[in-house]
Image (cartoon, rainbow, N blue to C red):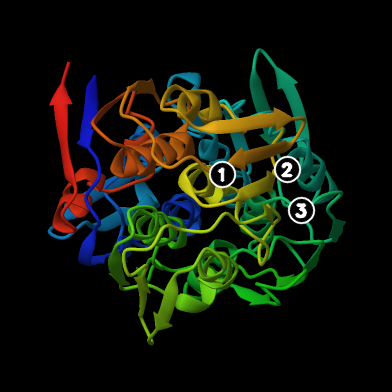
Amino acid sequence: MDRLEITGGVPLEGEILISGAKNAALPILAATLLSESPVLLENVPSLNDVMTTIKLLRSMGAEITLHDGWKLEIDPRTTTEYVAPYELVKTMRASVLVLGPLLGRYGRADVSLPGGCAIGARPVNLHVAGLKSLGAEISIEGGYIHARAEQLRGTRLTLDSVTVTGTENLMMAAVLAKGETVIENAALEPEVLDLATFLVQMGAKIEGAGTGTIHIQGVDNLQGTPYTILPDRIEAGTHLLAGAITGGHVRVKQVRPSNLDAVLRKLEQAGARIECGSNWVDLDMAGERPRAVNLSTAPYPGFPTDLQAQFCALNSIASGTGKIVETVFESRFQHTLELQRMGANIGIRGNTAVSKGVDRLKGAPVMATDLRASASLVLAGLAAAGTTVIERIYHIDRGYECIEEKLAQLGARIRRLPI
């Protein structure tokens, strides 16, 4: 198990390329099961979660070829198994995304109840209820969701709460259903729109993706297509924050600035000078200490919960007092205990973290508790005096491609050490 060693205090300078989005790649990989011919995916990030999904698809019989530059060719025509086993699903909650395409394409699915990061309950009841409304027979026994349907049929689905994976799962199930399906209170995230764009390119009939109401007219079959995964807005935001927390000047390239609006507004409030081009964002702190910001997480287009921990790290060394309210997950402040080990002054009350910025954090041994918490500790280490050692970085490898290499390109003193 590796760890990261960071010697902080260096303002980051330079530019890096942002990888494909993990949260778009995973549902799109699951959606390849719907195709009746091979699919070629480009800009697929090299991440542990992607490798887990590849293992899952291969366990079902799909043939997957990896080409140079992380292009994946997936041939689902050899799929003969319709089971997502606990051994794979327990490490990654997104494995539940195979439920919809398996049921829609093959009429059966046995999917283990999901695991993943320990950031609070993320139940699959909305997935199950929606699939039942589409005509599936579902039982939950022995830790598995057992779903069967000779033919799914379109219906109107009103989701009780906004759910990204729920919207994606139901959309994938509905594209081969008979008749029209309407999903109301659908998630608006760019990754949902990217999945819909991919499905349409394969022959699906979908309108309204990226809005609160999605209309899907079922088709008889889908065919393979080449497709390029959209850039990862969370990775982009994390590296911009790395520039901000160190007082540096960082440009991220191969991004979609419009997907970062809420994040860029908060970075400007923190004192950053932001410039955007068609596919790049430039952040310049001009050596200044950031100002503390207040924010509340919310589904897109609100402030993303996946960047909350990173802003918590920024607030810990900012001038003034900043308040962060977490409204999406109920157990997502575990990183604050580790930041306190580095000297952060953070108080937690319910779903709110209040940070009184200190002049400087101090390097310390710390432990990552989940994916985005690990990113916050990396940012804290970059800004801290002395050396920080981060344990359990397998979390960060789930969502960040070569993070130490990219930060090193910006001048960070960071290295990966085997234990």
In the displayed structure, 72 sits above or below 265; it is above
Pointer 1: what residue? 97
Which circle's residue, 2 or 1, is located before the other in the chain? 1
Residue 103: tell me if it is visible: yes
Q: CA distance from mark 2 to mark 1?
A: 9 Å
Which circle's residue, 2 or 3, is located before the other in the chain? 2
Image spot of residue 399 (x, y percent): 38, 44
Callout 2: SS: helix
**The disc label shown at residue 197, or none:** none
Q: Nearer the viewer, residue 111 or 355?
A: 355
Which circle's residue, 3 or 1, is located before the other in the chain? 1
Q: Residue at x 82, y 41 (%)?
A: 129
Q: Residue at x 45, y 28 (%)?
A: 343
Q: Amino acid at mark 1?
A: Leu
Report how many numbered discs are placed on residues in the image: 3
| Other-residue count near label 3 (Cα within 10 Å), few / some / many at <14 / 14–19 / ≥20 | some
In the displayed structure, 376 sits above or below 258; it is above
Q: Residue at x 28, y 36 (%)?
A: 385
Q: Of all residues shown, which one is farthest toward the front?
A: 359
**The disc label shown at residue 127, or none:** 2
Q: Amino acid at mark 2?
A: His
Callout 3: SS: loop
Q: Amino acid at mark 3?
A: Val
| Other-residue count near label 2 (Cα within 10 Å), few / some / many at <14 / 14–19 / ≥20 | many
Which image quarter: residue 74? bottom left
Callout 1: SS: helix
Cβ atoms at labels 3 and 1 below 8 Å apart: no
Q: Nearer the viewer, residue 182 or 359?
A: 359
Q: Of all residues shown, which one is farthest toward the bottom?
A: 278
Which image quarter: residue 123? top right
Pointer 3: what residue? 162
